[in-house]
Image: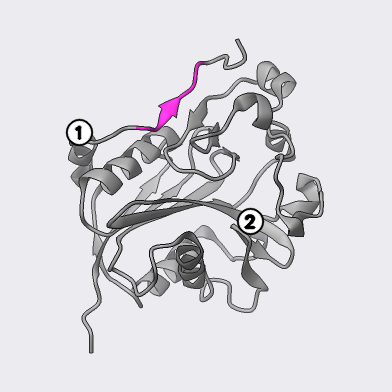
């Protein structure tokens, strides 16, 4: 029987998403181990892909009435509004850690399969770049792929407020399955489909353990990774990006 690869697993609580993205970038670029980061909650922020432009993606009037931090992450993908009810799951792996090709579609499909045991009995599937139950989205995904490593991070909606969704414009490119639906008709809450966050964490780590030998890592052990020399592309935009 082939020995399972090792995976450093760290569970965080209310880490600001800007700091989490900085950590992810450090672990991707300046570490060679496999990682899973699970973070529950953050202070509110808007997170854009590396090529995102606020004037195209963020509602100016709503933002100026209720300003919150805007972050441009180091990976591609869409724009999300995150807060205390968001769950973040990030996988960082060497290209030979799992038996898939080092391409976006294959990575997304493999990562999506990790969630199938979590949603037993629910109509869960990967739809374009999203995780959905039925025809409603609860998770968005983005990736960064380099020569010998890849990163796949997911933003999962345990809960959300429609007021927060007003920060986001309808994107120029929308998934076909969205069918131009507004947020209230397009999104769903994980809290409506699972008994609790504790069960989500348990079932997800059980699924991970089918593929990896988990090495539980303390928060104090990752601090030094942030200080290793590496390229840093995660940025916090000016408080008024419309000037």
Q: Residue 227: give its label.
A: 1
Q: Which residues are magenta?
A: 233-238
The foreground one among 211 and 201 is 211
Residue 19, given in percent of the width and then of the height, sits at 37, 34
Q: Secondary structure beneath disc 2?
A: strand
Residue 177 can be seen in this image? yes
| Quadrant in the rendering for residue 129 | bottom right
- Dot 2, crowdedness within 10 Å: few (<14), some or many (≥20)? many
Horizontal side, residue 140 vs residue 65: left or right: left
Q: How is the rendered protein coloured? A: one colour
Residue 157, given in percent of the width and then of the height, sits at 60, 51
Residue 190, given in percent of the width and then of the height, sits at 62, 59
| Quadrant in the rendering for residue 241 | top right
* Residue that appears at 34% across and 36% down: 22
Horizontal side, residue 120 vs residue 210: left or right: right
Horizontal side, residue 124 vs residue 111: left or right: right
Q: Residue 138: give its label.
A: 2
Q: Residue 106: give its label.
A: none
Q: Earlier in the sequence, mark 1 or mark 2?
A: 2
């Amino acid at each position: 029987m082939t020995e399972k690869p090792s995976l450093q697993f760290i569970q965080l609580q209310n880490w600001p998403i800007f700091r989490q993205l900085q950590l992810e970038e450090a672990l991707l670029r300046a570490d060679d181990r496999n990682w899973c980061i699970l973070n529950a909650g953050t202070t509110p922020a808007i997170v854009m892909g590396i090529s995102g432009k606020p004037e195209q993606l963020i509602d100016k009037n709503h933002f100026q009435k209720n300003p919150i931090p805007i972050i441009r992450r180091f990976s591609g993908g869409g724009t999300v509004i995150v807060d205390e009810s968001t769950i973040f799951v990030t996988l960082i792996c060497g290209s030979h850690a799992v038996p898939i090709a080092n391409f976006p579609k294959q990575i997304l499909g493999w990562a999506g399969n990790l969630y199938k045991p979590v949603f037993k009995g629910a109509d869960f599937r990967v739809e374009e770049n999203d995780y959905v139950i039925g025809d409603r989205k609860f998770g968005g995904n983005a990736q960064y792929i380099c020569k010998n490593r890849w990163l796949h991070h997911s933003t999962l909606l345990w809960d959300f407020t429609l007021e927060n969704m007003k920060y986001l414009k309808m994107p120029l490119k929308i998934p076909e399955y969205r069918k131009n639906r507004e947020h209230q008709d397009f999104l769903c809450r994980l809290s409506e489909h699972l008994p609790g966050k504790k069960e989500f964490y348990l079932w997800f780590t059980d699924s991970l353990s089918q593929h990896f030998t988990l090495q539980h890592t303390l928060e104090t052990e990752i601090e030094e990774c942030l200080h290793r020399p590496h390229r840093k592309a995660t940025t916090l935009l000016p408080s008024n990006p419309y000037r």
